[in-house]
Amino acid sequence: MPCALKITVTGRVQGVGFRPFIYSLAHKYNLKGTVQNNLDGLLIHVEGDKNSLKDLADEVRHSPPRLAKVDNITIQEAAPSGHDEFMIVPSENKGEAVPWLPADAAVCDLCTAEMNDPADRRYNFPFINCTQCGPRYTIIQGLPYDRPLTAMKGFPMCLSCKEEYEDPGNRRHHAQPVCCPACGPKLTLLNYTGHRLSENSNAIRQTIDFLKKGKIAAIKGVGGYHLACDPFQASAVDRLRQLKRRPQRPLAVMVKSVDAAREFCSLTKNEEQLLSRPETPIVILRRKEGCSLPDILSPGLSTLGVMLPYTPLHHLLLSGELPCLVMTSANTSGLPIFYRDDCQSDLNNLCDYLLTHNRPIERPVDDSVVQWDGEEIIYLRRARGYVPDPLTSKLNVNNILALGGDQKNTFAIGKEHYIFLSPHIGEVENEEMIHSLEDTLCHYKNWLKGEPECIAFDKHPLYETSALAKKLPGIKVPVQHHHAHHVSCMEDNSLMEPCLGIILDGTGYGEDGHIWGFEFLYGNAESVERLGHLSYTPLPGGDKAVREPWRTAAGMLLHYWPEEGRKLAADLFPEETVNLDVISRMVTNGINSPFAGTCGRLFDAVSAILGICTIATYEGEAAIKLADVIEGTALTAHEKEPYPFRVIATQDHGHLLDFSPMIYEIIQEKRQGVAARKIICRFHETIVSSCVQTILSVMAERPELNRTVVLSGGSFQNNYLRKEVKRQLRKKGFTVYTHQQIPIHDGGLSLGQLTIAAHVLKSLSHRKRGEKRCV
Amino acid sequence: MAGRISLAHGEGGELTHQLIQEVFIQSFGHGEQARLDAAVIPCFSGKMAVTTDSYVVDPLFFPGGNIGKLAVTGTVNDLAVTGAVPKVLTAGFMIEEGFPVSDLKKIVKSMAAEAETAGVSIIAGDTKVVERGSVDGIFINTTGIGAIGEKDLNPAAVKKGDAVIITGTIGDHGIAILSARQQLGLLTDIKSDCASLNTLLNQLIQQTEGIRVMRDLTRGGLATGLVELCEDFSISIELNETSIPVHEEVEGACEILGFDPLYLANEGKAVIIVDSKEADKVLQLLHSHEFGKNATLIGLVASISEKAGKLKLKTPVNTTRRLTRLSGMLLPRIC
Ligand SMILES: [Fe+3]
Ligand SMILES: [Mg+2]
Ligand SMILES: [Zn+2]
Ligand SMILES: [Zn+2]
């Protein structure tokens, strides 16, 4: 008597080779039935011997394909329907559930081996792929994910490819981008005037030659164009920096293998694994002592962003001759990445040569950036490979859109119990970036089939995202910046009960009109209470102070010590002596000097005081360069001694942190010639102690509060701060959470906003129901 | 006459009479009208333009002018950019008790002088004295009447590609006021651009074709002025940041203060939207005049839209910034 099972698998199961996998399992266990993709996920009907059914179910559960991310498997007994074979039946565009979109994945080992095999028909073919690898998100026009709705629709399969595509036992069964030299896209090398130089293998050969000569090439990748040059030629790197208008910000390199990475950087096992994952993110690694790569790749830093080749073309370019390339997104600072082929004339201004091909990029996406902090993965930029995998929520978040903030923007859209976080969009501060945000938003809406009914956004009155929110139809939910950070971290850890939060951040608009960013909170998505914060100091020049950390430092000195501050500032910043008169009057008379109490600006000030960075050329530069000094090294007992600071109990805001004694001592020590490293260590330790001490005084007054703490905000990208605050609070018996799946900086705001909006909607509908009952 | 204005100066009695005789009538020279309750003026043929504005400025005296001059130029310019030839003004004064009479005289004299330059007469006025603290020194309101000639502006003809011209450098007034406040110790001797533009603008209207609209720039600066123009006429304008003329010292002051010259006040600048074919001629005419010698083409009408127009700025790094009205946040009120 045959038995039958109905197995439903949801999660990232489409476009990842799940059907051929089931097909071969069915053959292995001699089972009959069907497998089908639909909008619900994967639907399997198998019948046959009871033990074999169990074996198949176990394998589905325990060893799914490499790209699959199974969210849920349900197995039900079913009535056998007498199938006499096992079949893959065509996709069905039916079902209610959330459409799942596959993410892009690096070329797999099997494909790489084929590509390197002179006997293979895809020898040296730069577009080789299979169900286990290749472009996905970036080539999809619409759902269901089938070839006619991808960028491959213009490339009809040749007979050999069609055979593989249709053979359920083949690795390329229903691999939508499958192709070969006979039927696939073509590579073309152009010079900057648009003149065609060569095609395919010749184009690769010539590109390598040009790069070796120190030229800059734009290379079409998965989510956009890269600009590439030889990192060992300082003049080429320098020119690239000028063209991109990016004087200091680190540039990532692509190295041909893990072994090559090991030549330049020290690597742990976890870092090796991160590098070689199908997502192939840029991994921030520590440069080795005596690393032969020039310092100008990451000026002032001991780290380097490294990634492995992820397209077949990358593998063909990186060879013994060229083991390493600078690979940076093709755009000038402040603009979105180039990805459209009709923009080639703009691209021509950025490069000498253009290595391109005729498979369109449907969706732009940047390279992801991650770091291993010794304990866990830190997502610095969540983009290619990670999007569009959704996060799951315990709440119904259907049709809520959260627009995030203006810096490191991501938006989030809710569908049922899933939250789709957009790829990193960037700094939304000009029309081009706003357009890029709107364009991505438009595609997400189409894919997820629905117009958002509720829009959450930041309370900052001057944010472009807030202006965008106001233009969209639907219920508007403005969310305070740090409440969003707090709830973002809670949601990232599925926490619902009120908890403590330490939010160390750059700049966020506060409820009192001042700039916040060193916040002690208690609450959850429903409401939050501000238990303490850093005392405010003026930022003379507003935004200008964010770009020029010396101003923030001067603002602090003049505010803390109206008499002596002017002299202290003049000693520290002799080159600004002329301007200090005006700056000090701006502070005294409150002219264009908004008040801020933020961790980011505190780091800026100390960085400027120590002369590490007085004027920033990229966001966070001062803080990043300061933190780099102690990164990855153990602190001595002397270095762990905090500077003096005060936690002042106030009536309205609970606890007010005052670091003026620390600032004073730092300046004295600098004068006395104390090593910068020691000052920086003690500064870090002071911030950590102040966090712990504030939490302890809060708990002493209100022992009824939950002893759970979430850590969020951009300043917690600082590894020492994050790890030490966590460690020390845990020692005191707190349960401490940081982010798991999304960035800790403003890139995670949208998740918090969306969750808060879901609660607002819930209480609105409760209230409505309540009103009806009353009537 | 006493050295300071007292409340009695506003009571309508002898002191009021004295004040009017000695300060206003002498300066404005209206012996005739003063005998009647209202000024009687000849009726202009065709259309007339009327505008009113109140002037409040701290400090009252600043490099390049004072509140009195401002009260004339501001109203004259509002008429001029409408395409009218300013004819007459009225002036209302609200004076704080204790205000020095000598200052009042200076202010009134410069009003008279500016009115003469602009070719308008001040034909009626009013004075109130209020208790100390009720106003800050002196507030002036002026109303202006002008005549629209045969040749008028033609906003309806505005089209894509039309040229956007500014008559000179931006932000001079804003920075002059800020530095005159002496709160900042700004090392600049920039003067306010405060000037009557009616002769210049009238000449343009008479001697060129295809002027669509003009707007004088005051507080809120070039950006706010153009945003309003874009919205009022449903056009989108794209400015080129590098071509916008900014006085070196204004730029230096903005650099240190963190201000954007696009949002700084002006009191003697206008933007002109004109058929691109006539742009060169307009520029030539402007350049030959003192108040237009730094005139520059700063952008183009990018599109005509059904909905509210937008103002965009191409930056030197090739990004496009959408400009909105002065937000008023973090910025002090500088005029
Ligand atoms: Fe933030
Ligand atoms: Mg006006
Ligand atoms: Zn593969
Ligand atoms: Zn083929």
Image (cartoon, rainbow, N blue to C red):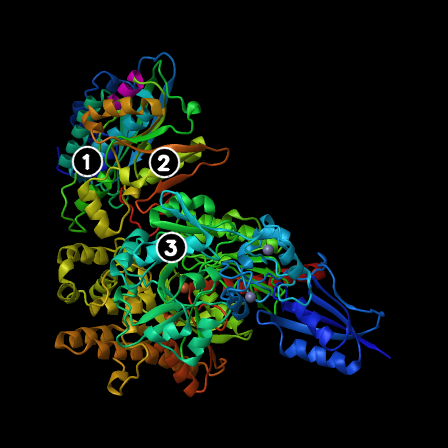
Q: Is residue A562 part of the magenta span, yes or no? A: no
Based on the displayed image, in which of its 4 quarters is residue A631 positioned?
A: bottom left
- Discs 3, 1: same chain: no
Relative to the observer, which residue lies in front, B94 or B266? B266
Numbered label tally: 3
Q: Amino acid at mark 1?
A: Asn
Q: Which one is closest to the eye, mark 1 or mark 2?
A: 2
Q: Assign the C terminus of chain A to one quadrant of the image.
A: bottom right
Q: Is residue A444 left or right of residue B189?
A: right
Q: Amino acid at mark 3?
A: Thr
Q: Assign the N terminus of chain A to one quadrant of the image.
A: bottom right
Residue topped by disc 3: A207
Q: Would you say the magenta stretch is mainly helix, strand or loop?
A: helix
Distance of label 3 from label 1 (alpha carbons) = 67 Å
Observer able to see residue A446? no
Instruction: From this view, report whether residue B185 is shown above or below residue A47.
Output: above
Mark 1 residue crowding within 10 angstroms, few (<14) / some (14–19) / many (20+): many
Task: Tell me which residue sits at (35%, 42%) in the image.
Answer: B314
Residue topped by disc 1: B66
Which residues are the magenta region?
B199-207
Q: Chain of mark 1?
A: B
Q: Chain of mark 2?
A: B
On the image, the x and y values in percent for residue A569 come to 16, 64
Instruction: From this view, report whether residue B287 is shown above or below residue A115.
Output: above
- SS label for mark 1: strand
Relative to the observer, which residue lies in front, B190 or A320? A320
Based on the displayed image, in which of its 4 quarters is residue A175 positioned?
A: bottom right
Residue topped by disc 2: B226
- SS label for mark 3: helix
Task: Tell me which residue sits at (37%, 72%) in the image.
Answer: A260
Ligand 1 in which quarter: bottom left
For the residues bearing labels 3 and 1, Cβ distance under 8 angstroms: no
